[in-house]
Image (cartoon, coloured by chain):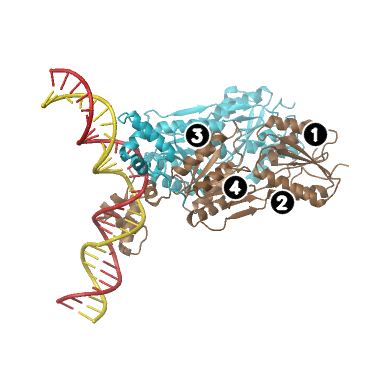
Chain colours: A brown, B cyan, C red, D yellow
Amino acid sequence: MGAQRSTLKQLAAELDISVATVSRALGGYEDISKKTRERVALKAQEMGYVPNSAGRMLVSGRSGFVGLVVPIRGPNLVDSFLGEFVTGLCEGLKGHGSDLFLATALESQSELSVLSHVVESGRADGVVLNRVAEKDERVEYLLKRKFPFVTHGRLLNADYDLNWLDTDGGAAFAEMFDMLYDLGHRKFGLLTISDPMTFRHYREAGLRQAIEKKGDPEVTLTEIKTERFDTEGMRRACRNSLSATDRPTAYIALFDEIALTLMKEAANLGLSIPRDLSVVGFDNVAASAYAPPGLTTYDQDIRGSAKQLTDMLMQVIVDQPEEPLTRLVKPKLIRRASHGPAPS
Amino acid sequence: MGAQRSTLKQLAAELDISVATVSRALGGYEDISKKTRERVALKAQEMGYVPNSAGRMLVSGRSGFVGLVVPIRGPNLVDSFLGEFVTGLCEGLKGHGSDLFLATALESQSELSVLSHVVESGRADGVVLNRVAEKDERVEYLLKRKFPFVTHGRLLNADYDLNWLDTDGGAAFAEMFDMLYDLGHRKFGLLTISDPMTFRHYREAGLRQAIEKKGDPEVTLTEIKTERFDTEGMRRACRNSLSATDRPTAYIALFDEIALTLMKEAANLGLSIPRDLSVVGFDNVAASAYAPPGLTTYDQDIRGSAKQLTDMLMQVIVDQPEEPLTRLVKPKLIRRASHGPAPS
DNA sequence: TACTTAATCTAAAACGTTTTCGGTACCTGG
DNA sequence: CCAGGTACCGAAAACGTTTTAGATTAAGTA
């Protein structure tokens, strides 16, 4: 139970003025005398008054919450970014007087139903979507519902206007290629997944464009594809590729986890990095600093991005802008020791 | 803005019955005829009715939210458990029809004010506290306020009854010692921090008790202390200890991060693990699997614990029990390759 | 004096729900 | 035909807040 909270009514009774006056006084309205305003503020402070959000919510129609629907995939593979992402969101929302509301979808199929519950119950004024897929039903639902939202990640071929913030993975992958090419590498391996995620699309496209732009017929690119959450399959695929006679000299991984798996397998096979082969990842997860010899990768300031996303979302909520808000942020190359000159 | 949500009133108008009847029908009350109940349920489904939480909240006094105040410490060291912890909480709350509400305290000093805001605004029915310190003002506030809460971690010398769930770090550290002792180690190093956290207290106490119990005068234990978030200091301390002439043969780290730092420094100094020295950690962070040769450590199922915590909290909220709820969960030893026989 | 204006304040409605208390209609047994 | 049940439904209050549309008083103006 707990001690009861003080209400406007109690405050009004104590001060012997009306509830309306108290409300307006606390709201800083000019048509309440300064003296009264101060008196009220003092008493409110004294009684530890904090407006009840349910009451406020009901009349204002705003909840003061921003929702995030988190998909839980697999038994133990919690989204490794979740902590940082959530932190950034909270941090950003703080400045807007809003709070974060987390809802989970236990299976990916229930994601939409969880989202719709969040939206329809009025518990949130807007939502943040992350990990958008190439074609995302959540997006379509929110658009139809005309509910404010922003996405972390772009959509593919979107013929509608969306508010998004994304990391420029394409640029990063192009840069990677150029770097490795300049180190003499010609045989490239792309460690990727088969799932239709937008980030995959853009990163791969960036890489292919860079290769094409270089126009060197010597350059080859073999794809090593696995399912996204199939760690065992990933291991096997890496081992296979490394054991091949014409194995690539430079591996580019869609994200760190695959790169780390490859590094481990390489070590098991007695291959030395970067002497025998180079590996580059993406994400800069904590382990990439500890795994020998240190994985060269890209850092996409998740926390900062999340913070920016909240600013965008609040803008969408309060004054829904004509022009869609979009931001492309550049990831930062983290040079470690997993890349080097091509073996001769 | 978005399309307007349907309300009980609209539903009632459509069905040409009273609002009260609709409410009771949806609530499954027996004094509404089965026929009407079905008719209402169907229409509700059809109109996509979802009860507005503000309205419900106002009358029930319950928000359907459970709060978590997350302290953000340091610029980049986001709590690595946060993701898992939050996931477990959401997962657990789902079963109770509640949701998670996250609030951040940007500085540790503001933690209490954030917490009190969560409590007083009525936005949460209960809160979960993690990372409790030996003496925690948040706890004292909540007790005084008689607000439902559970803590992840125990308090020290608590003369009041608390509802907590904790990992049995003491048992784990005792086990570690026995394991290393049996491998022939006599010179131990304890890599720890100087901050007054309860988990530190219990882990160290468990270790010391185990040493005492063994009663072998040959056993020595040197402490290597650093500040909790001072990674550079940690590095230096590890290097110093490793360079000492009578360096320990077995290091026990308060948590993985310190162990990983030590392993890296050992490698830099040309020392081989576990040939020259053994290291054991605690937490089983992702990097501990990747850092060579693989860190032996303990896994404390954070996600599962968080889930259990929600069950406890809901119990506290609905029927505040006389007896405090407490649970001590055993962490699981993850045997990797960082420990072995003492060098001769 | 009488009218206008400005400065303060308040009553009441509204938001969407749940719940209490009672009401109506129908049936049963005498 | 009536007393007493039973089955079903509805009116209204309550939760705490904000806001609209006055109401009251005081002061200024003609």
Q: Position of residue A7 (x, y in %)?
A: 32, 48
Chain assignment, label 4 = A
Determine if residue B155 is in view.
no
Helix, strand or loop at mark 1: helix
Residue at mark 2: A171
Cβ atoms under marks 2 and 1 closer than 8 Å: no
For image coordinates 55% across by 41% down, the residue present is B195
Q: Is residue A11 left or right of residue B119?
A: left
Helix, strand or loop at mark 3: loop
Residue at mark 1: A242
Chain assignment, label 2 = A
Residue at mark 3: B153
Tag 1: Cα neighbours inside 10 Å, few (<14), some, or many (≥20)? many
Residue at mark 4: A152
Helix, strand or loop at mark 2: helix
- The answer to whether dots 4 and 3 both sit on one chain is no
Q: Position of residue B228 (x, y in %)?
A: 58, 42
Tag 2: Cα neighbours inside 10 Å, few (<14), some, or many (≥20)? some
Q: Say which quarter of the image contains residue A79.
A: top right
Q: Amino acid at mark 2?
A: Ala
Q: Nearer the viewer, residue B331 or A32?
A: A32
